Image (cartoon, rainbow, N blue to C red):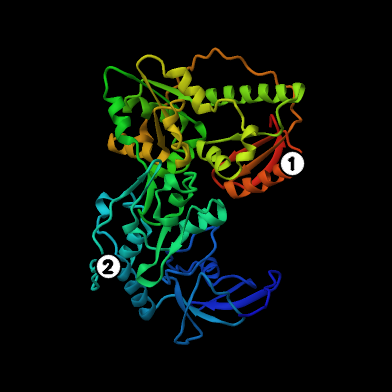
Amino acid sequence: MSSHIPDPNKSVNLTIDGQPVTVPEGTKILDAARKANAFIPTLCDCPDLCRRAVCRICVVECDGKGKLLAACANDVWEGVNIVTNNSRIANIRKTIIELLLADHPQECLTCPANTNCELQSLAQIYGVRETPFTCAGAARRAVSKDGALLRDMDKCVKCGRCVEACQTVQTVRAINSSGRSANYRITTAYNQPYEDSPCVFCGQCRTVCPVGAIYENDQSAPAWDALNNAERETAVQFSRTLCGELDNALGLSKGTASPGKTVTALKRLGFDLIYDAQSAESLAVAELARELQNRVKNGGKPLPIINCCSPSAVKFIENFYPDLKPRLSPCRSAREIFASLVKKGKTTAVSIEPCVSFKYGQKSGKEPDITLTVTELAGMIKLAGIDFASLPESPFDQLKTELCEAETGFKEAKRLIANGLGKARQILDSIRKGECDASLVEIKSCPLEDGWRCASICS
């Protein structure tokens, strides 16, 4: 193994499919090809995750030599001539796909990843209609239903993405690989259910899975049941910030899904009351500000307060930092506030959320009755045959509250925001050591933005 450390300030000149390319030293062949607009298919590669080079679909030829290199795991070098596609490479890639499909359930039409499956897309690109290989494997395993997440490991292509996301990005380490050769598999320790493992149901394994091996517990069916129940009202909250995700889920151009059109779509689905999530979020901020004021003025309870965006973030604290539980905010979340305001009489509370992490914790009774991801909402809109782009605008209903705005007196109070559980661990470790000088720490389950940032309490 070479001990050479690449210098990103040094340029490397190479040729990709006859096109000259200049990239910084240390650039992977795959990244250089993307710069040259040369398509190299991948299955195990995923942005922001360590490249494991296990699928080998990205193999390329270098300098006309017989040996093929994995484009995702090898650096370019000065003067190299790279061929990304020819008949030999195409046949090798097609064979790999056929081998994967030989050990993969042929259930595309009923799979939750149908039309959004990377293996399915590769099979279409390489014209795979049947596979010459057969697999005399074990009988079809049942789908593991672990609360917010479901696992169909017969569909796992063993790419390792979920392992990398769980271990390296989120640092939960609930899943890992075991066995070798034909017995190699992705699993939890002792193959225990997610609910019995350290899993916090953040959903990042589902986010990076290229096939339908891990997916969310779809609650569209109970949502339809609630909408078709004439004896009950249905109230739903939706955040304006989710409109961009709804565009993607519906396959619309950017900016099509406005808040007003989303309200109209929800009404046409049958929801009786549609509320802007900002109302409950403002009340949650007000409660948190009052709690912070009380702790700063009266002392007694420890600072910083730890406020979690979702039940999965709370479970992360309980699993790995039980000594910090007294610092968890006693205030209600926006979801709990919404549920407490609308779950009266014969009303079913439904909340639209950005990810799976909000599905965990519904059994507490304080959460909304049903939680739908944006993807599930998009599926309901498609099923109802609604032409979203042509919908008129409609206003939100007004959420009646008995809570008053908080008196904010600590605009300069220091707040730390951790995006992702791996980054949260750094801040939580500093709290344990007594090195954190923030008054409030907010933990978000998803690793968004730059991991963590500092801001004032009211920014």
Residue 291: image x %, image y %? 66, 23
Nearer to us in this view, 456 or 383: 456
Q: Is 415 placed above or below 182 here?
A: above
Looking at the image, which residue is at 46% across and 52% down?
205
Looking at the image, which residue is at 46% across and 46% down?
203
Residue 21: image x %, image y %? 58, 73
Residue 416: image x %, image y %? 68, 39
Viewed as shown, does residue 168 lie left or right of 378? right
Give the Cα distance between marks 1 and 2: 53 Å
Q: Amino acid at mark 1?
A: Cys
Residue 318: image x %, image y %? 56, 40
Residue carrying label 1: 436
Residue carrying label 2: 102
Q: Residues within 10 Å of mark 2 (few under 14, many from 20)?
A: some
Q: Amino acid at mark 2?
A: Ala
Quarter occupied by residue 438: top right
Residue 71: which disc?
none
Q: Is residue 451 at all visible to an observer of this figure?
A: no
Residue that protrudes farthest toward the bottom in the picture: 65
Circle 2: element type: helix
User: Which image quarter holds the N terminus?
Assistant: bottom right
Q: Is residue 338 at all visible to an observer of this figure?
A: yes
Nearer to us in this view, 195 or 69: 195
Viewed as shown, does residue 231 lie left or right of 350? left
Looking at the image, which residue is at 47% across and 39% down?
354
Lower sequence index among marks 1 and 2: 2
